[in-house]
Amino acid sequence: MLATLQGVEAVNAVLEATPESETCFIAITENQIVRKPLMQAVLDTKAVAKAVDEKDFDKAMSLRDTEFADQYRSFALTTHVQTDDSQMLPPEEVRYPFPSPLERNTRLITVTREWTLPLSMSELPLVA
């Protein structure tokens, strides 16, 4: 749906453009379809890259939009980088009981270091 709305806005931007119009791109900002100046976006992107190269991450974050900061916080909350091998899964398989929503039987999920999980409930073995 959003892609269609973006496409409609892009067509409108082309139809409304004049030779004097600034080149724009169509973006989604805070759930709104908006036109943004392309050259300013390029300058902003280069400023972020420069701040990252200089390891000024606070500045780099301040140059990004609010959605980026929100996504970064979500990523940080849901991701745990394990630097200590004692926190890693053991090399052997670890099995966890997992109730099937379709059946009353409990099935086992086998988790390995690669975190390979079955694609469907029917692939899970029944617990004896």
Image: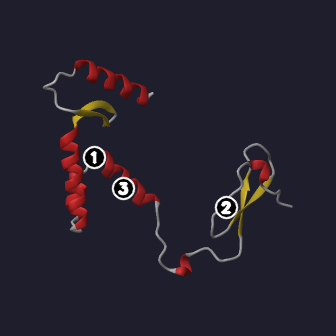
Front-most of residues 86 and 56: 56
Three-letter code for the amino acid on which mark 1 is drawn:
Thr
Three-letter code for the amino acid on which mark 2 is drawn:
Thr
Q: Earlier in the sequence, mark 3 or mark 1?
A: 1
Q: CA distance from mark 3 to mark 2?
A: 27 Å
Query: Which element is circle 2 on?
Result: loop
Say whether residue 61 is left or right of residue 100. Answer: left
Front-most of residues 83 and 41: 41
Q: CA distance from mark 3 to mark 1?
A: 11 Å
Please state the horizontal and vertical placement of residue 52, each as a whole percent of the image. Answer: 25, 63
Q: Residue at x 80, y 47 (%)?
A: 104
Q: Quadrant of the C terminus?
A: bottom right
Three-letter code for the amino acid on which mark 3 is drawn:
Arg
Q: CA distance from mark 1 to mark 2?
A: 34 Å
Q: Are the two marked residues, 1 and 2, in contact with CB atoms closer than 8 angstroms?
A: no
Say whether residue 19 is left or right of residue 116. Answer: left
Circle number at residue 116: 2
Front-most of residues 104 and 85: 85
Task: Reply above or below: 2 against 120.
Answer: above
How did the renderer colour the structure? Answer: secondary structure
Q: Which residue is mark 1?
A: 66
